[in-house]
Image: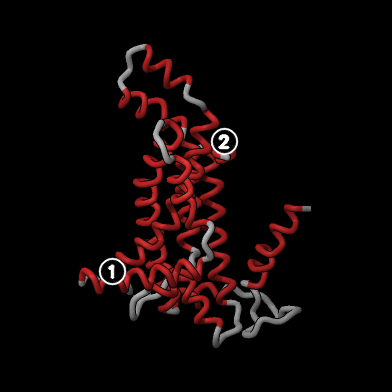
Amino acid sequence: MTLFFVLTPLLAVIWVSSFSNKIISFPPQGYSLDWYANAWRIENFRDGFLLSLKVSLLATLFGLLVGVPAALALVRGRFAGKGLISTVLMSPMMIPGVVAGSALYVYFIQFELLTTWQLAATFPGLVGAHSVLTVPWIVRLVTASLMSNGSSIEEAALNLGATPWTVLRRITLPMARPGLVAGGLFSFIVSFTDLEKSIFLVGPGSTTLPIAIVNYLEWNLDPTVSAVATVQILMIGVALVFSDRYVKLSRAF
């Protein structure tokens, strides 16, 4: 029953994307795949897709560079304030998107006033804002993966003469691979589909795919948006299946 409620909206979107109606209505007058070609012909969708893809990839990379060492320190390290640091790293997941987006915009403006370096309405600023989204996911999933494996194998390797770097490279990171893959994948998805932060921070003449979808829906009711959503669903589905084929994502939770 749960699977039914999860899959029904997705299947409905895919179904609507094949309607031939110029205005979405039931029952459909016929079926056509022209809306997919129409979506690619629309410059805002095409440019928004490419911008969202670039931002998401860079934000995921930055999230991995920050989140993996943070997770290792929180799980394997011994120092005061671990709880506070963990709360700070997880806090972006607890703040509503609109609040976080407006707060980042105000922060970028204040930063520019103090340093003359512009971050608001720039590509680096947008990547930085999306990186704030990715770090908590990576920390959370890598931490769960490390905790589920324990530290006994690493301790045994150290006792047998392996260096800390060898243990990290040959044992710790391979054991944390499910968390790394799951964290990177979910971070990419969260960044790629983000609307609330992006709408405050995109520059003039640029748009992300979620913003392009919202702008299109303001004046159009045809199945083009359903076609765009179907492509996103297929992308995410293929990524999940491919990742789970080589790295069992269930081990990360």
Residues 89 and 250: in front is: 89
Task: Check the image and report above or below for 81 versus 112.
Answer: above
The image position of residue 196, as x and y in percent, is 49, 70
Pointer 2 local density, CA inside 10 Å: few below 14, some 14–19, many at least 20: some
**Separation (CA) of disc 1 from disc 2:** 41 Å
User: In front: mark 1 or mark 2?
Assistant: 1
Q: Which residue is mark 1?
A: 111
Task: Check the image and report above or below for 148 versus 23.
Answer: above
Report the residue that reaches farthest toward the right: 1
In the rendered view, does 211 fall on the left or right side of 221? left
Report the residue that reaches farthest toward the bottom: 219
Report the residue that reaches farthest toward the left: 116
Tell me the residue at 41%/78% (across/down).
Answer: 43
Q: Secondary structure at mark 2?
A: helix
Report the residue that reaches farthest toward the front: 80
Tell me the residue at 65%/76% (across/down).
Answer: 19
In the rendered view, does 144 fall on the left or right side of 76? right
The image position of residue 51, as x and y in percent, is 38, 67
The image position of residue 88, as x and y in percent, is 44, 51
Task: Check the image and report above or below for 74 versus 241.
Answer: above
Amino acid at the residue labelled 1: Phe
Number of the label disc, if any, that sits on residue 7: none
Amino acid at the residue labelled 2: Arg
Q: Which residue is mark 2?
A: 251
